[in-house]
Image (spheres, rainbow, N blue to C red):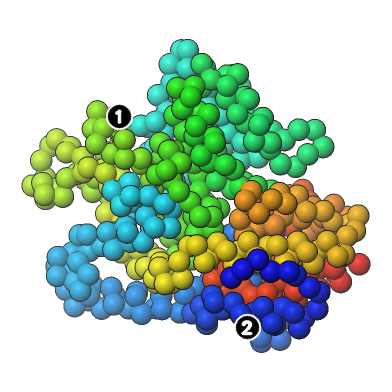
Amino acid sequence: MASIAFETGREFAAEINARDPLAKYREEFLFPKAPDGSDCIYFCGHSLGLQPREVREFLDQELEDWGRLGVEAHFRARNPWLGYHRLLTNQLARVVGANPEEVVVMNSLTVNLHLMMVSFYRPTRKRHKIVIEASAFPSDQYAVKSQIRFHGFDPATSLIEVKPRVNESIIREDDIRALIEQEGASIALVLFGGINYSSGQAFDMASVAEAAHAQGCLVGFDLAHAAGNLRLKLHNDGADFAVWCSYKYLNGGPGCVGGCFVHERHVRAFELPRFAGWWGNEEKTRFRMGPDFEPTPGAEGWQLSNPSIFSMAALRASMDIFDRAGMDAVREKSVQLTGYAEYLLDRHASEKFSIITPRDPERRGAQLSLRVPQVGRAVCDRLAAQGVLCDFREPDILRFAPAPLYCSYTDVYRFVESFISEIG
């Protein structure tokens, strides 16, 4: 889809819906119902993606094989469970821009973050600091601080937060690079979100990785809000590791198995310290039950236990849709949807709200964050009563994310119409 010259009016939204090559995928998802029984406007894909219709079919097959085969399903199921996670490997590699050996589905995001920090946060007396963005998701903050304490250091002196400047809402890329250059000799790890969960700011991951590596630091990314949202290029951008969840833009369902990336320069570095478990052991010798751990080459070597088959089955239903749609098309529509929302909101400029997400499409994903100090959480409740689902983060941020696989331009138009009406 070429760049769109936006116009006001519901008719225009319907017109670009009709030209949208991804519109057909909307029918492949189940929508919660509005109070009047119609499909709601669902702008919470940044929190929990919608359920693909085919999830039940994928789950039913594994339930049938469990009932039919019991433990033998590990080897004799239609998709044997022993290597079931590999059914997702190539698809996920395409979504995050990695080589297949660099990715694995396993655990949950924060568990994977801890596992990666065991290998890639190796503090010394001289180099012990971790750099994160201010207002990083709390779980990241808890994980980082606990790792610092575990190694005998104090977060008060070993944690550096990069903050927006006074009276600004987003972090300047120049300030990130300047801080890394200034503190580089004392930094062990730079850990950023691909997208900040609150502001919706997307960071230049290649720039962050380059700046970190230039100072001898390792670098990782939390891609909870970026996987399935941005056009990622993890291998080329050079991060040492990345982790993500699969229940937001990847639509894998609540608590879905997470994902992990380890750059190819590390995947055979068997000397790296790691916490080991039997599912990370070389598959050829795994069932010999030997006492010594033989790591599987690749990101799979960081696995601990066998992952949930049912969780991965649900994720497969969504990844099949991503494979058919293609991340380039998904990202292109996302840019248009947020651009359209921004255009309509700008037509109703008011002191009652402001867009804090970057205006540059390259520096944001599907999410726009609005500061609404005068109306607060109540506006979300009133919108929900109309069948418009978005969310609120304290103290005064309304977040909405028109996910491109199942949201339409008419959804955006109706959201803005309802929002402006509710804030008065």
Query: In terms of depth relative to the viewer, which is nearer, 362 or 309?
Result: 362
Marks 1/2: CA distance?
A: 54 Å
Query: In terms of depth relative to the viewer, which is nearer, 141 or 192?
Result: 192
In this picture, residue 345 sits left or right of residue 361: right
Q: Amino acid at mark 1?
A: Pro
User: Residue drawn 70% across and 62% down?
Assistant: 339
In this picture, residue 295 sits left or right of residue 349: left
**Residue 381, above or below 128:** below
User: Residue drawn 86% across and 65% down?
Assistant: 347
Give the residue at mark 2. Answer: 18
Q: Position of residue 400 (x, y in %)?
A: 68, 62
Q: Position of residue 184 (x, y in %)?
A: 53, 20
User: Residue drawn 51% across and 16% down?
Assistant: 185
Q: Please tell me the numbered disc located at residue 273.
A: 1
Name the element at disc 2: helix
Query: In terms of depth relative to the viewer, which is nearer, 142 or 353?
Result: 353
Q: Amino acid at mark 2?
A: Ala
Q: Position of residue 398 (x, y in %)?
A: 74, 57
Task: Name the residue furthest top.
Answer: 126
Closest to the camera, between mark 1 and mark 2, is 2
Label 1 neighbour load within 10 Å: few <14, some 14-19, many 20+ = some
Q: Position of residue 277 (x, y in %)?
A: 25, 42
